[in-house]
Amino acid sequence: MSKDKDSSVLKIGVIGYGYWGPNVVRNFYNNPQTSVVSVCDLSVKSLERVRRIYPSMDTTTDPADILNSSHIDLVAIVTPISQHFPLAKRALENGKHVFVEKPFTSRVSEAEQLIELADRKNLRIMVDHTFLFNGAVRKIRELIDSDTLGSLYYYDSTRVNLGLFQNDANVVWDLAPHDLSIIDHVISGAPEAIIATGEKHVNGVEDMDCITMNFPNKAIAHLNLNWLSPVKVRTTRIGGEKKMLVWNDLEADEKIKIYDKGVDPASGDAVYDLRVSYRAGDVWVPRVEQLEALTLEVQYFVECIVGGQNPVNDARAGLRVVQMFEAIDQSMAQNGKMVYSRSEKSDQRNGNSLISERETPVQADQSGRTAKTLVVRSSAA
């Protein structure tokens, strides 16, 4: 029996076939438990590409053809962020699960409305925080959960390149979603305060930005984002009490290097005695799985829908990232003024990795620990 005729197979409609859409279509198409029945895009040329690759797949320029179809179980939204909320809301109202590109929404109030709607209708939302399924990030989470690094001191990321300038987003909304979703995933708790400074040089939106995030456990996250760099850099340094690591996402093979280096407190008898001792040990490169992150993410979402479970990167995870975005924008608008946290977050951990290389693709725990999270409330919230 073909997938299209199998009632147990989830029927997928994809809205958006620009830069990322082809990858989403390909992965849902190749998954044995899903069938892509229709693709929508406003560009006729994009739809011609779809028909060349998938001759039997329906195409349309009208999103309503997918949103209103009784034959579609899940809508994947891969459009500019301004369209995320109205399309997702319409899909949920029509009883469909939603897979939505990052960031989740452009406002906290929109994310909260979608969460309420999905809960009321018992539907699943997955926000495409693809990097949570990246082999390097899964390895980092494993190292943190196993206490290999010890208590975290800092997360320091440089994500810079020349362009690409966006018409509907600044450099933060373009480059920061990956880091913010990773920070939310690997750092226990959530930021108490955020400071952000940026500047507009070219087209009226911030094209470079520096962000600092303070956590209740003394960890600090720092992001350097830039559209005006002569070179492309994707490097993250994570320092812990026991060990430190460097993750270079542009490195083909040795993406993560772990350093047995650190600083330990020491006692001295005289005031001039050195009060710290330095530790310099080995450097090693752990094995990192090279599976396509989006393939794992799609399979995981299918399993969550079938099992009636919310994914780790669900609407609430998407909301937390949007809360950070609003705080960053607010801080930038006030020339780097500190923006404080005003709400709480459930930190789902029990010592096991939420996304484990040994348990493909993901297992989530239900410990329900709480910690403060940064929230910028709108009047509609």
Image (cartoon, rainbow, N blue to C red):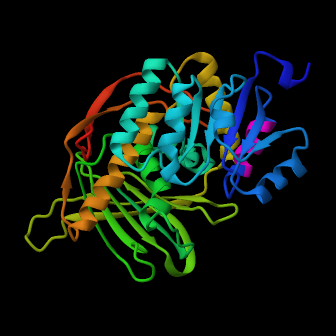
Residue at the image position 56 percent from the left and 17 percent from the top = 308
**Magenta stretch: includes residue 60:** no
The answer to whether any part of residue 152 appears in the image is no
Quadrant in which the C terminus appears: top left
Dividing the picture into quadrants, the one containing residue 95 is: top right
Quadrant in which the N terminus appears: top right
Which residue sits furthest left? 271
Nearer the observer, 220 or 211: 211
Residue 285 higher or lower than 92, as above or below: below
Q: Is the magenta stretch mostly helix, strand or loop?
A: helix
Q: Is residue 2 left or right of residue 355?
A: right
Nearer the observer, 95 or 276: 95
**Magenta stretch: includes residue 23:** yes
Q: Return the x and y of residue 179 as percentages of the image width and height.
A: 46, 55
Residue at the image position 28 percent from the left and 48 percent from the top = 191
Dividing the picture into quadrants, the one containing residue 330 is: bottom left
Q: Give the range drawn in magenta.
A: 22-29
